[in-house]
Image (tube, grey):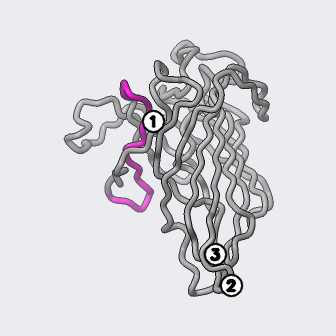
Amino acid sequence: MRYICSLIVGMIVLTACTPSIDKDDYFPLQEGVKWHYIVSEQDTDTLEPYDFFIENLGKTKKTLSDKYFDMPVHVRRDANGTKYYILDSEDGIFRIAQQHIIDSDLRYDDPERMVLPSPDNYDSGDTWYSQSRTYALRGSAVDTVPDTEDIYIDMEYEIDALNASINVPAGQFNGCIVVIGRASFSLYADPKLGYIDIEIKQTEWYAPGVGLVKILREEPKEAGLFYGGSIVYELKEMTF
């Protein structure tokens, strides 16, 4: 079972924004907030929905590289124990590092991964690039098939809409920013097909005063010796 933990970067308020979260904040970082998701996978080997959470741990107390000295870096932790280091800068929100439970130190992102541009720069059609990897796509049980976890790709993200509405288990959210990411890369599918183009699409809904309320990742169902599907995270609850 795989998780798209690095993609979960914003969350919810169920009825009204708390006093510490600005009503126009699309990416809350306040300490102590915890968000719960229902995850569903289609056309993968995971048939039953499962729960997943992200929680804010506050500003990091860890000594970072000189590049981030005295900068506002916050920490998030997911259900697997992985920590994500998030930079809140004038240019936007960036993931700068992560640390799995087996890691003795941080794994810095090079380059940094932009999650959202600065709110001052929100405009339909705006684009940026960020590195990602495949999450649903995997190879069949053949020794010659490469491990898709080692495939990193450049995603082009675009603000597709600025005032969308979305329904999730937590309720309806209006005024959402919709971000769509796309990537295409060549993969050796099998001896008959040779190399084929793999198309990946990711759609994210961010609500004001809330954060990310839904994410949909779509990867090919069948591609020679590889198979994939879609993964959906939908917000169901927030706790403090």
Horizontal placement of 40 versus 204: left or right?
A: right
Q: Amino acid at mark 2?
A: Lys
213 vs 129: above or below: above
Q: Quickly name the residue at label 2.
A: 192
For the residue pair 2 and 133, the one nearer the viewer reads as 133
Inter-mark Cα distance, 1 to 3: 36 Å
Q: Secondary structure at mark 1?
A: strand
Which badge, 2 or 1, is on the more N-terminal residue?
A: 1
User: Which stretch did the figure color magenta?
Assistant: 89-104
Which badge, 3 or 2, is on the more N-terminal residue?
A: 3
* Quarter location, residue 145: bottom right
For the residue pair 79 and 178, the one nearer the viewer reads as 178
Residue 100 in magenta stretch = yes
Q: Secondary structure at mark 3?
A: strand
Q: Amino acid at mark 3?
A: Gly
Q: Quickly name the residue at label 3.
A: 139
